[in-house]
Amino acid sequence: MWLRNCWYVIAWDHEIPPADSPTLFTRTVLGEPVLVYRTQIGELIALEDRCCHRHAPLSVGRREGDCVRCGYHGLKFDHRGQCVEAPGIEIIPAKAKVKRYPLVEKNKWVFVWMGDPALADDALLPDNFSCDSPDWQNKPGYLHYDTPYLLICDNLLDFSHLSYVHEKSLGGSTRIAQARPAIEPVPGPNADWPQLGIKVSRHVNDVPPPPFYQRFRRFDTNLDRWFVYEFLLPGTLLMHSGGRPTGSAPDAPGPSVRLHSCQTLTPETATTTHYFFQQSHPTGEGDGTVTQSIYDSLIGAFNEDRDMITAQHRNIQHNPTLPMMPLAMDAALIQFRRLLEARVRAEQQAQTLSPTQPATMA
Ligand code: FES
Ligand SMILES: [Fe+2]
């Protein structure tokens, strides 16, 4: 169940080679191989990475200026995806072309629109400000999952798992699992999108500092911790989190931890997922090792998640129709799944009424 008319992150900007590089970047999104490259003037282009002739990947061909030549029989495509040269063929058929996808770069995330290009709307891009801000520092990360993307959405929508999966890393207290978060809708940018996601706010007071915090700041007292995040369609988490000495006012001077995290999930196939993430700390807080230390902690913790979700997925595959047992802690993920299902249904109904979705951009 995938939403198509929305933005998915396909890459961090540093992953796309410069225009003078012979390397061509490719990544599969929603089961479609997508080639991404930069033109001489720096514009990012996304084309279907499948030659219209015999379906060879264009990414194993070569760049020729702003064009790409297929490495199998030599068809050459321009930045619109149109075939402009076919060896030995004088008149090139108009339908000799590959799909071009809308692409947008925002704060170091490169977004691709997999649905109807006419509906691509920048207002739907998430506010991933801390990925590229002078006020925040981070080290970007990427993980690959051999599980469906919705299982990872479920994980991010229920932080009660911090107490158990991340007992020795991000969590550190069973009180996190016991705390009930507040859940509210996140409105969308316009009438076409009345709701874009849900907001989850979890406050846990008077708990020991998690092992993760101790790696970059020493605390001798218990902390009041907060996790406040939006989880937006199709699968992006934008979170403020932190901790301060128990009882201290939110703006009181003194030791505290303030973090902002941007994480996003992009289905690769029905059973595999791309995970892009970063956790930022305020610029100037801590010494030069803090950014790397946070990154290392995050990778460690996200591997804990991946191990658990991969094992869960294996079990589900043994008997996919066996029902699960919903509990109170599942409220946010159930709401998100309902929102996604309704949106996918509406998209599919619109597609049925108007089945002539354009295959290419001009
Ligand atoms: S498969 Fe690309 S030119 Fe034949
Ligand atoms: Fe986790």
Image (spheres, rainbow, N blue to C red):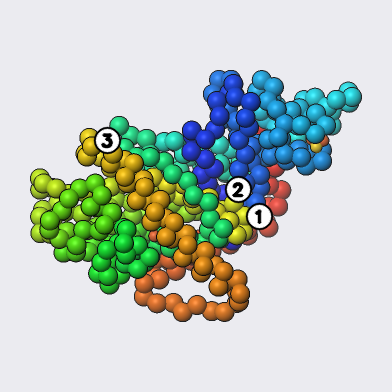
For marks 1 and 2, give the CA distance.
20 Å
Task: Residue 57 in the image: state x and y as whole percent.
Answer: 72, 39
**Is disc 3 placed on a helix, strand or loop?**
loop
Please report whichever mark, 1 or 2, sits nearer to the chain's N-terminal start. 2
**Is disc 2 placed on a helix, strand or loop?**
strand
Could you tell me which residue is drawn at 54 percent across and 33 percent down?
A: 16
65 vs 205, left or right, is right
Q: Residue 340 versus residue 221: which sits nearer the camera?
A: 221
Q: Which residue is mark 1?
A: 351
**Badge 2 amino acid:** Val
Q: How many marks?
A: 3
**Badge 1 amino acid:** Gln
- Which marked residue is nearer to the observer: mark 3 or mark 2? 3
Could you tell me which residue is drawn at 46 percent across and 79 percent down?
A: 325
Please report whichever mark, 3 or 1, sits nearer to the chain's N-terminal start. 3
Q: Which residue is mark 2?
A: 29
User: Would you say residue 120 is visible in this rendering?
Assistant: no
Q: Which residue is mark 3?
A: 288
Task: Residue 34 in the image: state x and y as whole percent.
Answer: 64, 41
The quarter of the picture where residue 55 lies is top right
